[in-house]
Image (spheres, rainbow, N blue to C red):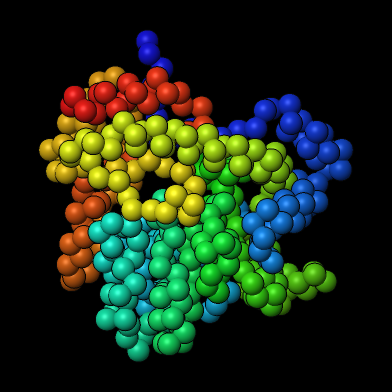
Amino acid sequence: MKKPMYVTQPSLAPLKELQPYLEEIWENGVLTNYGPLVQRFETELAKYLDVPHVICVSSGTSALQLSIRALNISGEVITTPFTFIATANIIAWEHCTPIFVDICPDTWNIDAEKIEASITPQTSAIIAVHVFSSPCDTERITEIAEKHKLHLIFDAAHAIAVNQDGASVLKHGDISTLSFHATKMLNTAEGGACITNDEQLANNLRRLRYFGFNEKKEVVDVGINAKMSEISAAIGLVNLKHLDTIRSKRRAAFEHYRNILSNTPFIQFQNYKADEYNYSYIPVLLESKIHLDRVMSTLEKHSIFASRYFYPALHTLDNFKQNCSLPIAESVAEHILCLPLHDEITENEIQNICYLIENS
């Protein structure tokens, strides 16, 4: 039986490179509570990204949660309906109300020019998402946030190793958040991080991830358990060494797809800048729902499983249903498909997938 091919698979360093870190953990007996490997991972990641403060946590979702708490956000939070459910879930979980704004038809990021119309006296923050690693209009969104005195968080779950205007895209906003989930280009199995330029805010985030304890083990805040484990940090340390190679391999695979499918009349690609993209995913927009269903059905018959990121648009879900029409987000969500992409995929596999798509 042919081995199934899924939309992604974890990028993993050679197992032998992990062994010394595991031996160190077994030797010192430290598994958690901000151990030496987490500290080392934060330091090395900050150096790699050229950012001042990296606060590692248990997941990308907890990174968003701590960010909302650290900034004392309440009321309404403007965000995009075209993102993973966690972005909206955590807004609601923190007793805030997500207010959805439509997206750009080409980048699929939140449309900065539509944000101000949704700002009310109850608005306290904007959470913008760099969808599939393509940066949003950070300059314009920052201008709006500053004009209206709103907190600004960038959900950068997809955007590791992405620069914008020559600097890390993670330097924008009060806080940017990362995910190190197994599906991400840099993974720690499970994990995430908050990135900030503000030292006081960084210290606040460190307290919040550890029950509200300060460095003297005094409880000075209401925190939760959002710590990263030493084993996760070990996986992160070995994978970080291969990140540039992984990105290069994914870019080559992405471009191979694009070269083959660029003249396919019923497929549209996301608008992105080649040097501001990390090629974590290969999203394509199908011309119609009929085309999407045919492509998915054809691929599945050959044990190839693409995925509908992000469907349905969040504002249409019962949990968040709002009396608004966001036609671009609805259309993109209805017709989007992510094809299999990872650093071990072969040219022959890509050619076969493209052949099946074109002949669906």
Side of 57 relative to 78 (left or right): right
Screen quadrant of the N terminus: top left
Residue 97 at least partly seen: no
The residue under the point 30% across, 75% down is 113
Q: Position of residue 192 (x, y in %)?
A: 58, 54
Placement of 317 over or under 6, stated as above or below = below
Q: Does any portion of residue 80 appear in the rendered image?
A: yes
Whether residue 95 sits left or right of residue 209 in the image: it is left
The image position of residue 233, as x and y in percent, is 69, 46
- Where residue 121 appears, as percent x and y from the top left, is 35, 89
Q: Nearer the viewer, residue 114 or 189?
A: 114
Which corner quadrant holds the C terminus? Answer: top left
Q: Is residue 300 left or right of residue 5?
A: left
Report the front residue among 319 and 152: 152
* Residue 301 versus residue 45 in the image, above or below: above
Q: Residue at x 39, y 32 (%)?
A: 256
Q: Position of residue 129 (x, y in %)?
A: 42, 61
